[in-house]
């Protein structure tokens, strides 16, 4: 058998196998605000050599640069959710990418079904303490503009976790180096798509 050039390590062959198995499907990250979807998504996209897209950033672009908080304040949550569903549908139709979604996006049945049909989903699962630590300094989270943000996070987790469990993979988001979480995403994708440890 002819010799092949050495790969850049075992990870490189895993990543190539995942990309081949995905074909035209995307990888979609779901989970609560502060779970690290954008941070992990960027690194995962680089490893899989796919473009990274943040659905929230795309929604802001579609609204002439209005922030998510401004869209919520001006038009209300139902309007925002309808726009979010349209943006995610467009992103899923635009070819393979790694897509970070807003915390509430996966709650919509039609969006979930689109993701099932066109992507592999990863739930970055973060507990309330981690979420609060990561988001408490940010004023751009409209759902946390309440008298008791911790209680709001608790309520949202209770409502959303049973739905997030429908994701193809669950990866625990915690205070470890980002690359460790990315490695776990790669391992999980490889097992799911290629059937190998």
Image (tube, helix red, strand yellow):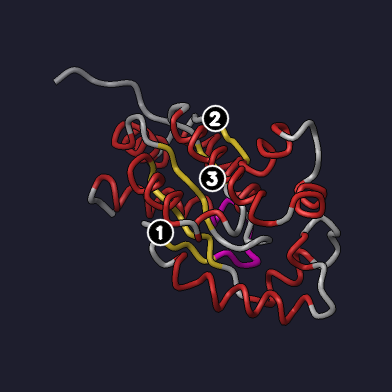
What residue is shown at x 59% (from left), y 69% (from top)? 126
Left or right of 58 on screen, residue 9: left
Mark 3: give few (<14), some (14-19) or many (20+) Cα within 10 Å.
many
Residue under circle 2?
Answer: 51
Q: Quadrant of the C terminus?
A: bottom left
Q: Quadrant of residue 3?
A: top left
Q: Position of residue 40 (x, y in %)?
A: 59, 49
Farthest residue, direction top:
2
The secondary structure type at the circle numbered 3 is helix
Q: Position of residue 73 (x, y in %)?
A: 81, 54
Q: In the image, which is nearer the foreground, mark 1 or mark 3?
A: 3
Q: Is 176 covered by the magenta stretch?
A: yes
Label at residue 167: 1
Q: In the image, which is nearer the foreground, mark 2 or mark 1?
A: 1
Residue under circle 3?
Answer: 85
Distance from Cα at disc 1 to Cα at disc 3: 17 Å
Q: Is 3 drawn above or below residue 8 in the view shown?
A: above
Q: Earlier in the sequence, mark 3 or mark 2?
A: 2
Magenta segment, which residues?
173-181
Q: Position of residue 59 (x, y in %)?
A: 67, 39
Q: Is 80 drawn above or below residue 16 in the view shown?
A: below
Mark 1: give few (<14), some (14-19) or many (20+) Cα within 10 Å.
many
Left or right of 92 on screen, residue 80: right
Label at residue 73: none
Is label 2 in contact with label 1 (beta carbons under 8 Å)? no
Q: Quadrant of residue 135?
A: bottom right
The secondary structure type at the circle numbered 1 is loop
Q: Is 6 covered by the magenta stretch?
A: no
The secondary structure type at the circle numbered 2 is loop
What residue is shown at x 38% (from left), y 29% (from top)? 7
Q: Quadrant of residue 11?
A: top left
């Amino acid at each position: 058998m002819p010799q092949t050039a050495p790969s850049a390590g075992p990870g490189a062959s895993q990543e190539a196998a995942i990309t081949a198995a995905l074909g035209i499907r995307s990888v979609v990250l779901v989970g609560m605000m502060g779970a690290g979807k954008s941070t992990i998504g960027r690194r995962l996209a680089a490893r899989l050599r796919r473009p990274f897209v943040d659905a929230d950033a795309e929604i802001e672009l579609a609204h002439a640069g209005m922030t998510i908080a401004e869209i919520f304040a001006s038009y209300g949550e139902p309007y925002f959710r309808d726009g979010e569903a349209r943006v995610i549908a467009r992103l899923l139709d635009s070819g393979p990418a790694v897509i970070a979604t807003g915390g509430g996006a996966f709650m919509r049945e039609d969006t979930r079904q689109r993701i099932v049909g066109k992507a592999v989903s990863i739930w970055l699962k973060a507990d309330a303490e981690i979420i609060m630590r990561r988001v408490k300094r940010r004023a751009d989270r409209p759902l946390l503009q309440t008298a008791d943000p911790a209680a709001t996070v608790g309520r949202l987790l209770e409502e959303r976790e049973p739905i997030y469990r429908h994701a193809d993979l669950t990866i625990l988001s915690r205070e470890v180096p980002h690359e460790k979480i990315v490695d776990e995403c790669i391992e999980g994708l490889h097992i799911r798509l290629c059937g190998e440890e």
